């Protein structure tokens, strides 16, 4: 399995911290955000290659970080240098998939700017059991927050019936965090999804299209996700995060 890590954003809401430095390499406790994610995923022994998709401005920082890690990590520079010229998450995913050999066990696709209090190995196990592309979901009580994220409708067996990104009229309170699993076959459909008109900025836009084509299942998130979106949330995470407590 390959793990694609979305890290090409410019994190403008965290300026000046991230004006010349990537958000995924900010420290939470004694480790970077990416360290928390990759070191946990690696315990599954299912991922043999990590591909960090960066913009040109931050690529050298990721390369310096990767050189010190024990995992096999490739940094892929998407060539953009400003927030205004960014490719968008779905096109970055397409770039990464086209740049590497197709893995038999598919792709774990994650945003590189969140920390979790549970192990992502649970999600990997869930996806392997289902044998399909999969996502996670959590109950979001705030209707205001639902307007800013992916929202899914699922049946009694966890199958995704519909997904929307930033809909003005969310259908449910099931929000979708940026953690996905694509089968090898489904990953090859990203270009087709883009051609069909799926959005390219939010990473969930591809899943919103894919679930209308093939079965996609949604695991209920077993713990908490800490989204680091601005300076205030980063300071809060630094105060409260205690690491992965749910294995």
Image (cartoon, rainbow, N blue to C red):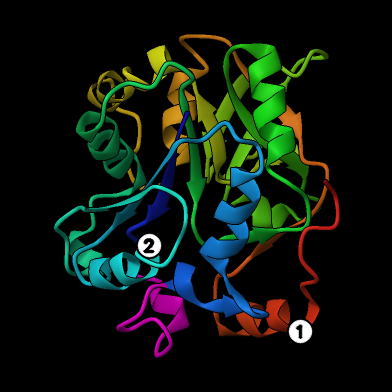
Vertical arrangement, residue 31 with respect to residue 120, above or below: below
| In this view, the mark in front (2 or 1) | 2
Gap in Å between the C-alphas at discs 2 and 1?
26 Å
> As drawn, which residue projects farthest toward the bottom?
16
Residue 26 in picture, x, y percent from top left: 50, 77
Residue at image point 31% right, 18% down: 188
196 or 103, which is in the foreground? 103
Vertical arrangement, residue 90 with respect to residue 52, above or below: above
Q: Residues within 10 Å of mark 1 (few under 14, many from 20)?
A: few
Residue at image point 68% right, 43% down: 120
> Is residue 231 rendered magenta in the image?
no
From the image, tell me which residue sits under label 1: 239
Residue at image point 40% right, 51% down: 6
Residue 192 in picture, x, y percent from top left: 27, 18
Q: Quadrant of residue 91?
A: top left
The magenta segment is 10-22
From the image, tell me which residue sits under label 2: 66
Residue 177 visible within the image: no
Residue 150 visible within the image: yes
Image disc number at residue 19: none
74 or 133, which is in the foreground? 74
Residue at image point 49% right, 27% down: 208
> Is residue 20 rendered magenta in the image?
yes
> As drawn, which residue projects farthest toward the front?
70
Would you say the magenta stretch is mainly helix, strand or loop?
A: loop
Q: In which quarter of the image is residue 244?
A: bottom right
Residue 134 in picture, x, y percent from top left: 60, 24
Viewed as shown, does residue 13 lie left or right of 58? Answer: right
């Amino acid at each position: 399995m390959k793990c694609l890590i979305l890290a090409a954003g410019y994190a403008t809401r965290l300026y000046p911290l991230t004006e010349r430095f990537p958000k995924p390499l900010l420290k939470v406790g004694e480790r970077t955000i990416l360290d928390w994610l990759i070191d946990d995923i690696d315990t599954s022994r299912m991922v043999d290659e990590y591909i960090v998709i960066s913009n040109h401005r931050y690529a050298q920082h990721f390369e310096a970080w990767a050189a010190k890690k024990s995992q096999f990590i490739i940094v892929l520079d998407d060539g953009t240098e400003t927030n205004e010229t960014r490719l968008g998450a779905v096109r970055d995913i397409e770039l990464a998939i086209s740049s590497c050999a197709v893995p038999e066990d598919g792709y774990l696709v994650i945003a590189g700017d969140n920390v979790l209090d549970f192990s992502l190995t649970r999600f990997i196990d869930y996806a392997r059991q289902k044998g399909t592309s999969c996502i996670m979901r959590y109950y979001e009580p705030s209707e205001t927050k639902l307007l800013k994220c992916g929202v899914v409708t699922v049946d009694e067996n966890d199958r995704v019936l519909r997904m929307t990104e930033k809909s003005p009229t969310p259908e449910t309170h099931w929000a979708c965090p940026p953690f996905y699993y694509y089968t090898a076959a489904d990953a090859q459909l990203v270009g087709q999804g883009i051609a069909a008109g799926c959005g390219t900025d939010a990473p969930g836009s591809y899943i919103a299209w894919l679930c209308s084509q093939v079965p996609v299942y949604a695991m209920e998130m077993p713990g908490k996700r800490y989204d680091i979106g601005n300076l205030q949330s980063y300071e809060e995470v630094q105060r409260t995060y205690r690491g992965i407590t749910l294995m």
